[in-house]
Amino acid sequence: MSKRILSKRILLPILTAISTALYSAASSAGTPIDFTSQDWQVVCDNTRTCRLAGYQADNDIELPVSLLLIRRAGANAPVEARIKLGGARENSAKALMQLGNRHRIALFINDKDYGEAKPYSGTAGYAELTSAQVNALLEALSKSSKIELVVRNTRWRLSDKGASAVMLKADEAQGRVGTASAFIRTEGASKPSSSVLSPKSAPALRMVMPNPKAISANKKKFVMRSSQLSELMKGTIKDVGSDCPSLFDKSSWNVTRLNSKQLIVQHNCWTAAYNAGKGVWVINDTRPYEPKLITTNATDYDKGQITSIQKGRGLGDCLSKTEWLWTGKTFEKSHESNTGLCRMIEAGGAWQLPLYVTDVKISR
């Protein structure tokens, strides 16, 4: 993979350890967190909801499995647990799960049967663990354990490698270290539950539907040569060679009116082995044009929404996604997420792990 693609962070981020002091300062501000340790990943969004995803060992590709733990902020927030199984021998996994009550998924920890999960949801694509199973699983994940999900005679092995590290990161992000509700409990934990951080509200964002039929105030049609547009946009990009090497090529520019004074302008920026990105700008339709770069990684634009979806690898079993919405003056980021590690659970990735969420209302 090229150096430029790595610099654009198309691969899902694998972060190194962060000091407790810095980490705590970031989490108290609701800063999104993405941390990976071996076969586990934790992603906490800007509302302080944390999602922890574990997988099979990286070399166990025949029976891929993923477990998702979800915990919102707040002292009394429960832990939800969901399971997805990938293709088993003769691709029988989903067929078995969809039989529902006849063939539910059973949880085994260190060869002890902890019973069956709730019925598999064909619509949601996962089964949920019971509260008793969640409690047993959390204790097992805090130490070395053999964890298996079983359907009839097929066993999916969930790795415990890295689980305790990401559980500790989630505790730090939510202010649970040293409290009774921590994933990783320490001897003599004495901090009160009041020290656990409260949830943060998602930022409010009002989307305004563009009006491409709006008439410009000067009633003149916008006309600018491709070379002029390239020169105009060049000044908005830090490193054209890295971020938008196709800015000066002969591919066409796409110009669409947003309202009576502003335009959205698009142009191909880069192409790689299995990803591509467009540049998207907002400009005035007359001087001063004042171009504003929104992104050089866009993959789609439709009715006031810019989307960037990038694969973590060519197989397409993991993705990253970012969205921006038109607010009447500019585009603002409304969503950022990834689908977890690239572990062959299913096409498009196993889960939605948000880093940034908003409360969107639409004005027409």
Image (cartoon, rainbow, N blue to C red):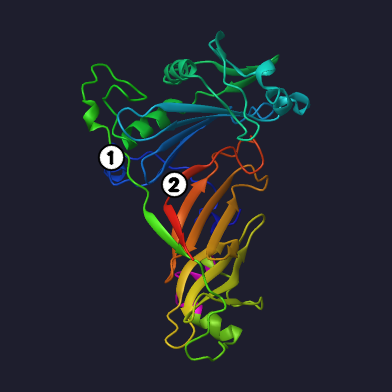
User: Farthest residue in the right direction?
Assistant: 90
Query: Picture coordinates of residue 274 (x, y %)?
Result: 66, 54
Q: In this view, does 202 lie above or below 299?
A: above
Label 1, residues with CA under 10 Å away: few <14, some 14-19, many ≥20: some
Q: Give the residue type that dot 1 points to.
A: Ser
Mark 2 or 1, nearer chain start = 1
Left or right: residue 214 compared with residue 20: right
Residue occupying image coordinates x 60% and y 41%: 349
- Say if the magenta span includes residue 241: yes
CA–CA distance in space, label 2 to label 1:
17 Å
Q: Is residue 283 above or below residue 347?
A: below
- Disc 2 designates what residue? 355
Left or right: residue 288 compared with residue 105: left
Find residue 86 and report its image quarter.
Answer: top right
- Say if the magenta span includes residue 121: no
Find residue 227 and report its image quarter.
Answer: bottom right
Left or right: residue 169 compared with residue 62: left
Residue occupying image coordinates x 29% and y 28%: 177
Label 2, residues with CA under 10 Å away: few <14, some 14-19, many ≥20: many
Query: Picture coordinates of residue 22 (x, y %)?
Result: 28, 43
Q: Is residue 171 visible?
A: yes
Q: In this view, does 132 lie above or below 259?
A: above
Magenta span: 233-242
Badge 1 element: helix
Circles 2, 1 touching at the beta carbon (< 8 Å): no
Residue occupying image coordinates x 41% and y 44%: 45
Query: Picture coordinates of residue 352 (x, y %)?
Result: 53, 42
Q: Can residue 37 be seen in this view?
A: no
- Disc 1 designates what residue? 24
Query: Picture coordinates of residue 294 (x, y %)?
Result: 47, 67
Left or right: residue 109 compared with residue 181: right
Of residues 180 and 317, the one drawn nearer to the viewer in this rendering: 180
